[in-house]
Amino acid sequence: MRILVSNDDGIFSPGLMALAEVAAQFGEVLIFAPDFEQSAVGHAITIQRPLKYHPVKLLKGFEAYRVNGTPADCVAMGLFHWGGADLVVSGINLGSNMGSDIWHSGTVAAAKQGVLFGTRGLAFSQNIFGNEPTYDRQKPFIAEVLRMVLRSPQEMPSLINVNLPEDPIGIRWTHQSVRQYNGKVVESQDPMGRRHYWFSAIPLTEPDEDSDRWAVDHGYVSLTPLRLSLTDDEWLSRLKNTQQP
Ligand code: MN
């Protein structure tokens, strides 16, 4: 079992190391991660300049490379370097990726890039409060998720978005909470008096039951199966039946 590990927080993230440690219980691990933070770049790829990757010495002796590119670039480089893999895992992101975050997430994009190349992809994320996390309480649940997926891969979705609560009590299958998205823009000034802006997204509504946010709020590890097709199948069949041009 060959497991490629990536993230969007960068090669020195504590979340990356924690995920690699758990993955190593299941097979051979190779790390390809961005050389600096690439959070919220989504599924961007680099096409205007060449990519490079260099070996990095990490703790625990993992074979690791830093890439001057996006999370999706890292997975492409890693699969090229290794000649494929059985599984791509991404994270553990320093911050949850639920609801509309999934559109922006580089963490999810890395897992998704693995699936686009025909492997299986799992994205892991967790909200962090205060000190640097140890992930002691999350590691057994991450191992359980990997066990579940690898035990009967044919009965498992190929792309799963995993969000971990601070103190997990169990695991739940969930749906993405597609909520009202306020896209708040906050205007301020830099020290030279020039205007600048912060754009952030804040959920406006309470999460619906069995959604990703709901599960994490209730202490469950949230597992959301994702698909690559964005086609709205409901609309498509309705339009084909009623308004075929
Ligand atoms: Mn991140």
Image: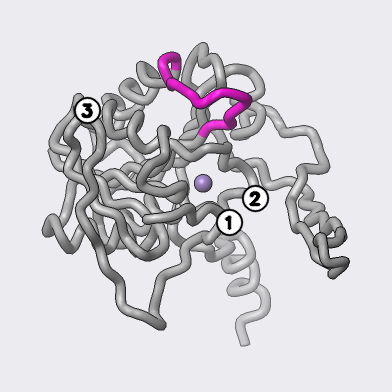
Q: Which mark is residue 194?
A: none
Looking at the rendered structure, the secondary structure element under dot 3 is helix
Left or right of residue 74, residue 4 in this image: left
- Tell me the mark number nearer the camera, choosing from 2 and 3: 2
Range of magenta residues: 126-137
Q: What element carries label 2?
A: loop
Q: How far is mark 1 from mark 3, CA to CA?
A: 29 Å
Q: Do the residues labelled 2 and 3 touch (CB within 8 Å)?
A: no
Give the vertical position of 71 relative to 195 (above or below). Answer: above
Task: Residue type at mark 1: give it.
Answer: Trp
Tags 2 and 1 in contact by the CB under 8 Å rule? yes
Characterize the magenta stretch by its predominant secondary structure: loop
The reply to whether the residue tagged 2 has its Cβ within 8 angstroms of ligand 1 is no
Assign a secondary structure to mark 1: helix
Q: For the residue carrying disc 1, how many other residues have a C-alpha within 10 Å: few (<14), some (14-19), or many (20+)?
A: some
Query: Could you say which disc has been placed on residue 100 in the image?
Result: 2
Q: Name the residue under label 1.
A: 103
x and y percentages locating residue 211 in the rendered image:
63, 33
The answer to whether marks 1 and 3 mark residues whose Cβ atoms lie closer than 8 Å is: no
Query: Which numbered disc, 1 or 3, marks the residue that appears first in the sequence?
Result: 1
Which amino acid type corresponds to the residue marked 3 in the rendered image? Arg
Residue at (62%, 87%) from the top-left corner?
245
Q: Residues within 10 Å of mark 3 (few under 14, many from 20)?
A: few
- Residue at horizontal 57 percent and vertical 37 percent from the top: 96
With respect to residue 106, does 16 lie above or below?
Answer: above
Tell me which numbered mark, 2 or 3, is placed earlier along the sequence: 2
Kindly identify the residue that appears in the image at 45 percent across and 50 percent down.
8
Asked if disc 1 is less than 8 Å from ligand 1, the answer is no
Q: Is residue 135 magenta?
A: yes
Residue farthest to the front, as pictured: 192
**Residue at mark 3:** 151
